[in-house]
Image (spheres, grey):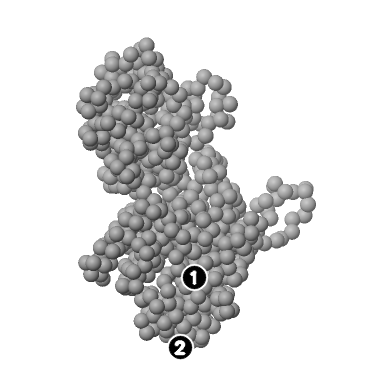
Amino acid sequence: MHLPRSILSKSKPAFASNLNQGPPLSSARVISRNTQTQLRDHIVVRGSYSNDENGHESVSNYFSHIVSSSIATGDAASESAALNTPLPKSDFGKFVHFFRQASPYISGHRDRTFVIVIPGNVSSDRALLHSALSDVALLHGLGVNLVVVAGVQNQIDHLLRERKMVPRYMAGYRITDRETMKVIIEAAGEVRTQCEQSLSKGPFIPMIRRHTKGEKEIHFEPALTVVSGNYIASKRRGIVNGTDYGLTGEVRFVMKDAIRKQLDLGNIVLLNNLGFTAGGEVLNCSTHDVGLAAAVGLNADKLFTLHLDDVVRLGLPAWLPVSDAQKMLLERVEGLLTGDQMDVLRSSLDVVQASGPASFIPTDSPDTAPSVSASVLSLPKDQIMANVDIWRASGFPMAVSSCVLACTRGVKRAHLVDARLDGGLILELYSRDGVGIMISGDFYEGIRKAVLSDVDDVQALLLPLEKEGVLVKRSRHELEAMMKDFIVIERENKVLGCAMLLPLGQTDDGVSVAEVGAFCVNPVFRGSGRGDSMLDYVEQEARRMGIRRLVLLTTRTADWFEQREFLFQGKAFTSKLLPEARRLKINPARNSQLYVKELATFDQSLAQPGKRIGF
């Protein structure tokens, strides 16, 4: 069994060390994610395994094999046979290895609230719907609070055509008359029943008898409790630019307290496209708007949206910062607006970024046009960029738009997962690198290379640590000469933190080494994640430079760095892990200790530092 060197090198008993040691924080998604592997790549490599540099199999590859090594088929007989087939003994080690690597995520996601949107183009395929709901059932078993939003757009269009009726849309919204509404209610009811049916299926008795035999007879009951109801408050969209949208609705809010009560009881809450007015009308709402309102109203930890080719065609990176998405929006709507209108839109982007998340804003009032109109641009600046109709006009798929908007309104993370990858939700959540697209705030906002004018701010940050003896004292002249090797993080023109990445050359065995030093965050801003972002940026930059080994020399405890996979290697001045020239400069009297982190070879296909998550 492989044990990290940080465990083997501890002087205290291994048992106590193992129980006290938490997972390396660099295994968390915020600081470890590679460029997205497209769906076709998963299809090509299915059934094969890839190993990391230590010879360990990729968790994503192995677990995709465990969950399913192919695209979802929905074959119940095949699934039953697969679930009842014992795991080969040769795979036991891999199985245990997966759970050990997944353990930080299992613990971290427990009791969190996730909203999962299954749009109509996914739910209309029974195999894809069943695959997604299998993931939902597993997530619930792992302790996640779940709200599922099931769309029915494709089913509605199919039923309308089947009955010789024509689906009608205007500017991305369905025009809903009373006959169409009857079809919509029928389609919503059918999909709701399918979801309840799938989530009611329990495990086969022979699978669980080994752990229950002798206690009492096992009786069937639904595996999960699914509840639905009039949780969506809506209003009519009304007449817009002369078009009467009939019974098409806009989401006002979701009944968050009622939903939260059901989640607290351990139930899965199932929502759909049906909203209800104070007057008792039933309205047809956008599934993505429902998911967005639910995620924002419940202050959900994550919003997931399943998708098909409409998102794949965009070629989005594995991590899309909200700021980058908003810049893409500006590029897309530029031809639709005048110069003055573009200036208003750009200024609203600045306000949104400066003011932080906004509360849920309905799509628009009944007299607002479903395109980028003057009435939209006359909204308060902090609401313009958060308006759904601007994103609709841009041509972005609503799967993407709703995820971006969720992040601007307080949801910490939003994820886009291809529905055709069986087990995709599990792989996205419980493997190190994930398989989808994550949208979030910019982890690297304000991080940049230092310039000479930063020297006073950097010196002010380091001075307290130099006085305490934590850092070696450096004169202003020395700092000026080293500014080219510094990275800083600033906010509103104030430097909040700094780090040095100093190339040291090669060791005797040809390994390129760089030293991380002068790592400091202003005490007022510690605990905000800025240190993690800065270290991640440093590691990315080191890989780009061809560095294979990062070293840290310190005379104090390095728990923070140990949690980020820096391994203790003993006294620095005797270590052959450092180039000789650096060893000769170490003062043995300081008794500096050496911590090392090995880096993987740089992949030229990866985005530049600050544009990806993880090294």
Tell me what residue is drawn at x 41 percent, y 71 percent: 364
Percent position of residue 347, x then y: 29, 59
* Point 37% across, 21% down: residue: 467
Q: Residue 164: which numbered mark, if any?
A: 2
Q: Secondary structure at mark 1?
A: strand
Amino acid beneath label 2: Lys
Query: Is 170 or 528 nearer to us in this picture?
Result: 528
Q: Of callouts 2 and 1, which one flags the residue occurring earlier in the amino acid sequence?
A: 2
- Residue 178: x %, y % from top left: 51, 86
Assign a secondary structure to mark 2. loop
Q: Which residue is mark 1?
A: 251
Front-most of 346 and 124?
346
Tell me the mark number nearer the camera, choosing from 2 and 1: 1
- Given residues 58 and 514, the one toward you in this image is 514
Rounded to the nearest angstrom, the CA distance separating label 2 from label 1 is: 30 Å
* Lateral position of residue 76 relative to residue 537, left or right: right
Residue at 32% x, 73% y is 373
Counting from the top left corner in percent of width and height, residue 227 is at: 63, 65
Name the residue at the top extreme. Answer: 589
Q: Quadrant of residue 548?
A: top left
Q: Quadrant of the C terminus?
A: top left
User: In the image, what residue type sits under mark 1?
Assistant: Val
Please say whether residue 501 is visible from this viewpoint. no
Mark seen at residue 610: none
Residue at image point 52% right, 60% down? 297
Residue 255 visible in the snapshot: yes
For disc 1, the neighbor class at 10 Å (few under 14, some 14 to 19, many from 20) is many
Q: Are marks 2 and 1 in contact (CB under 8 Å)?
A: no
Q: In the visual, does 269 lie left or right of 552?
A: right
Q: Nearer the viewer, residue 28 or 358?
A: 358
